[in-house]
Amino acid sequence: MTANRRDFLKASLAGVGLIGAGSGAPLFLSRTAAAVPAADKAGAKDTILVVIELTGGNDGLNTVVPFNDPEYAKLRPTLRQTPAQVKKINDQLGLHPSLAGFAELLQDNVLCIVQGVGYPNPNQSHFRSMDIWQTASLNENVSEGWLGKALKGLPGAPSFHLKSNNEASPLALEGAPVRVPSIATLEEFQLQLAAASGADKKEQRDIIESAARSNGGPGLLDFVQRTASNTYASSRRLQEIGKNYQPQTPYPNTPLGGRLKLAAQLIDAGLGARLFYVAHGNFDTHATQAPTHANLLAQLSQAVTAFFKDIAARGHRDRVLVMTFSEFGRRAKENGSRGTDHGSAAPMFLIGGKVKPGPVGEHPSLTQLEFGNLKHHTDFRQVYAAILDRWLGVSSKDILGAEFSHAAIFKS
Amino acid sequence: MAGAGVKNLDPLWAWQPYRPSTEAPWNLPRVGHLYRRAAFGATYAELQAGLKAGPEALLDQLLKGGPGLAEFDAQMASLAQSIARYNDATHLRAWWLARMLHSPHPLQEKITLFWHNHFATSYAKVQSARFMLGQYELLRRHALGRFSELLRAMSSDPAMLIWLDGRDSKKGNPNENYARELMELFSLGIGHYTEKDVREAARAFTGWEIQGTKAVFNAQQHDDGVKTVLGQTGNWNADDIVRICLEQKSAAPFLVAKLYRFFISETAAPSPELLAPLAQQFRNSDYDFGALVKTMLASNLFFSSHAYRTRIKSPVDFVLNIVRGLEGAIDATALAQSLEQLGQNLFSPPSVKGWDGGKSWLNGQTLLFRQNLALALTSTEDARFGRRCDPAALARKYHKETDAELVDFFLHLFLQGDVAAQTRMRLLHYQQQAHKLPAPVYWTQQDSADQRVRSLCHLVLTLPEFQLD
């Protein structure tokens, strides 16, 4: 795509919701050159963050495995991964055997593993704990998400929630200046009309779009109108891009694979997209965990690896950061159903050309448990803070409400 | 519609039965409102009849259901046999949607949907259409009955025993999944119990197994030791835990608030004072849910501006309002499948919390799916629905011919005429000038006229007001 075409697209997307809140001139034009960090540094304006939610509570202990710890075998009599099975990180730690792709990324020095991540007084409700992670706040009834808030500081940054059919827009994206569009596929993201002629079609579209124009009426109607007008405008523009996308590496034929391929397509279209959110699950493995967990991790590893290779081959290796998180890990000791109940601390993965490769922090102790759960030593907001300040270039203090020391996830 | 200020709602006024008055007359918007919330929308004839009948008679009819329920149930039961035998989830979804469309007692189905969302169990894990059907029957049997009985029965429902791992929960090795959600999502709400309550209660639910197609209690695997749950100590079993939960002060307000969101409003959270009289009534009646439903639907508040168009239509409501309104005789299988894209795949809620509802129903993608589905249903050219849901045929049935008659007919049918004057003018202008637009040469005059009516109907269904419930 030529620079002119890219600028034309950016300009035409501004003010319709895909770029910025629109205050007349497209915001990317009004920004002064001094405010733009050098493009070769982390925190440059064109960095991209892909957040992958592992829905349901991923079993961290069987994801990054302390295979040499004798306590591990005791806690996991039926679910344990043996030293021969794991993909070794070092002589203590190994990745679940399904994470073969992640092992490759580790060899390429683009995989960072932050161990023992959680927060004080862990909550074991899926929904409460997910809210805590998504709002980056331990307070209840917070209506804005950490990424939505971050977008306030990123004017002109198109963002996408890449959704599956039964999935609503995540709380993490609430509070954005312009509602982040949810998209399943580009083909389905358009308004269909049956009309007698082209002129008729235009008349119908005019009526539909004018009805969607908000006149600041009562709350819910206004919400529908804003969603609708934003959507119609976005869908019109997106029809122009991304056709005939040829990935540089094959993607697995899985839902997550499809969504990450769409992310690559949107990145490659040169819209200046900064933020993507996808969910993968369900990790709530209370019973007969082994096959489900292995399958979900394999899907994660295969899709992320394909995405990263594809993006890297297109020259975006150092622009992209993938982050995984789950609302909690699981109980250290397996239950009587060959599964695990809700727990707390767990590892997070970060993938990208600028990450500090390898494990960060110790594996939580298997003997000093808290109500049977692993204790965290790193607050997830320390990871968020590093990403906000150093990767997205927005003030973490404003978004998190306090100063958090950065987790050491980037190369210094 | 008139009503007192949101913050100063008088609970006494709010829950007294609505009586038509000059400020709050019995009119078409109120008839439509009741049919949307207490059923799945209405036909043109039903709206007119409801207007004549008055609020009491219409509500009474909706609460009791029409004649022929027993025959209908028998017919549907025979259709369900093959669903269980062949583990056919696709037809199970279609079967329920057909029940919602055709049952003489739509309120019963609507409340069953409320319970399905409350005890949100998914085929994705249960993998048995027989058990999902069994849970549906349980929910419908108790839909307008006592919540206490329903909650007790749920402890040994086979689908639930699989969904929340009760069948794997054994003495010495309890599985906490069901005990936690019982307190968090089914009866008390978060913050009204401790982690210790969850772990202790889990022991009381041990011992249930599934043998063949039945849930069976195995005393050998049940932990009959002493447990302390929510301050009460004893060798409790499953029924005891349900009893203890329902003795908590937080249980009744938790359920009442959930029903409030379902029937009254998603936009403003009600104050505890507003809900207090209903919570008291609910608890004092041993959790008589039918009585609670009746009080809410009959109330001043229900027929006030605080309730009117203060919800987003769920996908089920969206599609059924269209099909019922158009008196369509379409294939429920295709319709049920389309619900998945809209975000409400029946028998497959996204998590045990159910569908979040409200604003979460609508995002860029689901809005486009809705508008495109409305087109598929009204265009008569879609392979899934064909000509069996034809706005042009419906307009002929009610003798609507002129441009103005047609515009008003569809606006009344789907929005009871309650749209801005400008919207009506735009539609009328479209309808008038559409005569002049070119059409394919092979269309007859009738083809062109029918096409205009179908497009008009689609345009009405794409209005933002139609997304509101």
Image (tube, coloured by chain):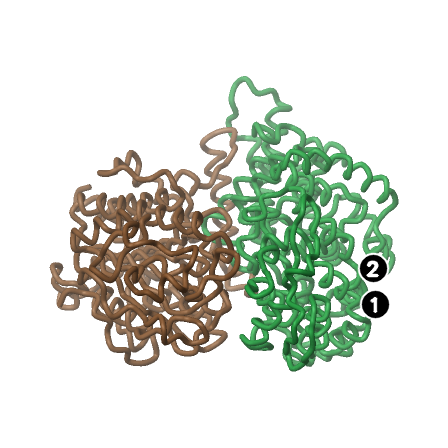
Chain colours: A brown, B green
Whether residues under marks 1 and 2 lie with C-beta atoms below 8 angstroms apart, the answer is yes
Q: Nearer the viewer, residue A204 or B58?
A: B58
Residue A180 in view in this figure: yes
**The residue positioned farthest toward the top in the image shown:** B442
Q: Quick check: B366 left or right of B223?
A: left
Q: Nearer the viewer, residue B316 or B1?
A: B316
- Quarter of the picture containing the N terminus of chain A is top left
- Quarter of the picture containing the C terminus of chain A is bottom left
Q: Quick check: B341 left or right of A87?
A: right
Q: Residue at x 31, y 75 (%)?
A: A377
Which amino acid, mark 1? Answer: Arg
Label 1 chain ID: B
Residue B401 in view in this figure: no
Q: Residue B19: which numbered mark, if any?
A: 1
Label 1 packing within 10 angstroms: few (<14), some (14-19), many (20+): some
Q: Quick check: A314 left or right of A258?
A: left
Which residue carries the number 2 mark? B55
